[in-house]
Image (cartoon, rainbow, N blue to C red):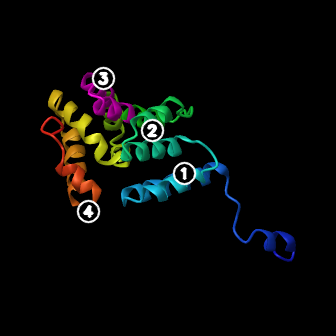
Amino acid sequence: LAVLAPHRARAHPHPVLPPTVLARRRAVEARLSTMIGDLEGAARALDMAPDETADVAAARVRLAVERGDIAAARGVLARWPADPEPRACSERLLWLAVLDHLGGDDTTACRRIAAVVAEAERERDIGVFRAAGHHVLGPLRLRYREAPTAFLREIVDGLTATARRRPGPTKELVEQLTEREF
């Protein structure tokens, strides 16, 4: 290959990735940084994202919620990129439920999380909940009290166990949950 196009081999030692792939990579970096408590690292990763995809938007919302900046999280949700994938729609609805719950609107939070749970149960997909982390526990617990299912119990138990095992800020947040949130 270098013989046929020597200038390409030297100019690009690594393949140039499409913007959507780079955006996904930055979103994953941001999620991982957020999970370990490196919020500045998460912000830097998101600043380098070339596109505003649903993955990047979700990482931005989680970062804003971690920082306690609900207004910024709502702003990202208002500008959520159009994405025909059901997962992106579910993720947006999940974060709206989280923000509703944080804002004290449990009725709307429960209605929204019910739609996400129904879609996830059809696919047997709990990844959307894992990606949101402990933030989604409040709305999920509300829904479980209203309409308990084995699938929902599995999600709540798994997220609760994960949150309790985590050292640092996440563990402190779990210990600070009010009776209403449980």
The kind of residue tagged 2 is Arg
- Local crowd at mark 1 within 10 Å, few (<14), some, or many (≥20)? many
- Where does label 1 land, which residue? 46
- Left or right: residue 96 compared with residue 83: left
As for residue 98 lying within the magenta part, the answer is: yes
Q: Point out the tag, 2 or 4, that comes first from the N-terminus.
A: 2
Q: Which of marks 2 and 4 is in front?
A: 4
Question: In what element is the residue under mark 2?
Answer: helix
Q: Nearer the viewer, mark 2 or mark 1?
A: 1
- Distance from the alpha carbon under mark 2 to that under mark 4: 29 Å
Q: Which mark is residue 167?
A: 4
Q: Point out the tag, 4 or 1, that comes first from the N-terminus.
A: 1
- Where does label 2 land, which residue? 87
Q: Point out the tag, 2 or 1, that comes first from the N-terminus.
A: 1
The kind of residue tagged 1 is Leu
- In the image shown, does 14 or 182 lie closer to the viewer? 182
- Distance from the alpha carbon under mark 2 to that under mark 1: 20 Å
- Left or right: residue 120 compared with residue 139: right
Q: What stretch is highlighted in magenta?
A: 95-114
As for residue 24 lying within the magenta part, the answer is: no
Q: State the quadrant of the C terminus.
A: top left
Q: Which of marks 3 and 4 is in front?
A: 4
- Where does label 3 land, which residue? 108
Q: Point out the tag, 3 or 4, that comes first from the N-terminus.
A: 3
- The answer to whether residue 5 of the structure is visible from this angle is no
Question: In what element is the residue under mark 1?
Answer: helix
Q: Point out the tag, 3 or 1, that comes first from the N-terminus.
A: 1
